[in-house]
Amino acid sequence: MNAYLWVRYEARRGLCCSTQAHGDALIGDLSKLIQLEPQNARPLYLRAELLFEYREYKNALADCTRALELDPHHRLARKLGLRVLTRLGRTYEGLKVYRSSGSDTGRSDFADGMRVHHLAGQCIAKAREHLYKGEHLTAVGVLSEAIGRYPEHAGLLEKRAEAYTLNGQPKKACAD
């Protein structure tokens, strides 16, 4: 990977903190990386994550699909592809994403993804209750434990960033 662009990507990611301007800059950097290294699945997946965050689901799905073409065993790209299809209202097409990725365990991966989504949703609901009660640190603890179990679930990070913000810890919120 081009070291200069990668360092710029990492630096901007640290500054990002959910502002569209920094996110656009990150997407631009990743697009340059993709042009320089068109056979590398990692920047495609990272750009897909950002596009998903900004609700550009069709573009995110295109990047996930391309990443899976380059690396059929890219598990995170497959999971993100499922999340994108779910947001587009095409959840059951997620099975095709797994099958086309070269995985023989498409159905179990799909079931695992749905299970993780359900369990992480329960943790978010529990943390939300603590936030409503003003128990911000308890919510952070619940979410941190859940992130340890389900690191691929972005909703947990988003909710923990919210809890950090409410607790007056904006630097930790930006880190999430």
Image (tube, rainbow, N blue to C red):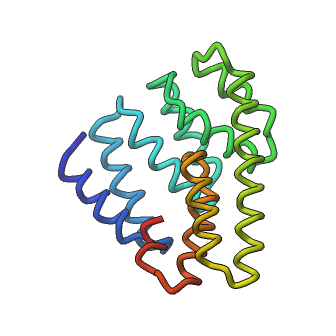
Residue 72 placement, left or right of 139: left
Residue 81 pos. (x, y %): 63, 39
Residue 64 pos. (x, y %): 55, 38
Residue shown at the point (59%, 33%) measured from the top left: 78
Q: Is residue 77 visible?
A: yes
Q: Count the marks: how many? A: 0
Residue 157 pos. (x, y %): 56, 61
Residue that sits furthest to the top in the current view = 104
Residue that sits furthest to the left in the current view = 4
Residue shown at the point (23%, 55%) measured from the top left: 7
Residue 41 lies, with reference to residue 20, above or below; the image says above
The one nearer the camera, 79 or 51, is: 79
Residue 115 picture quarter: top right
Residue 170 placement, left or right of 95: left
Residue shown at the point (56%, 33%) measured from the top left: 65
Residue shown at the point (72%, 75%) measured from the top left: 130
Residue 124 picture quarter: bottom right
Residue 103 pos. (x, y %): 60, 17
Residue 60 lies, with reference to residue 140, above or below; the image says above
Quarter of the image for the N terminus: give it. top left
The one nearer the camera, 175 or 100, is: 175
Q: Is residue 20 visible?
A: no
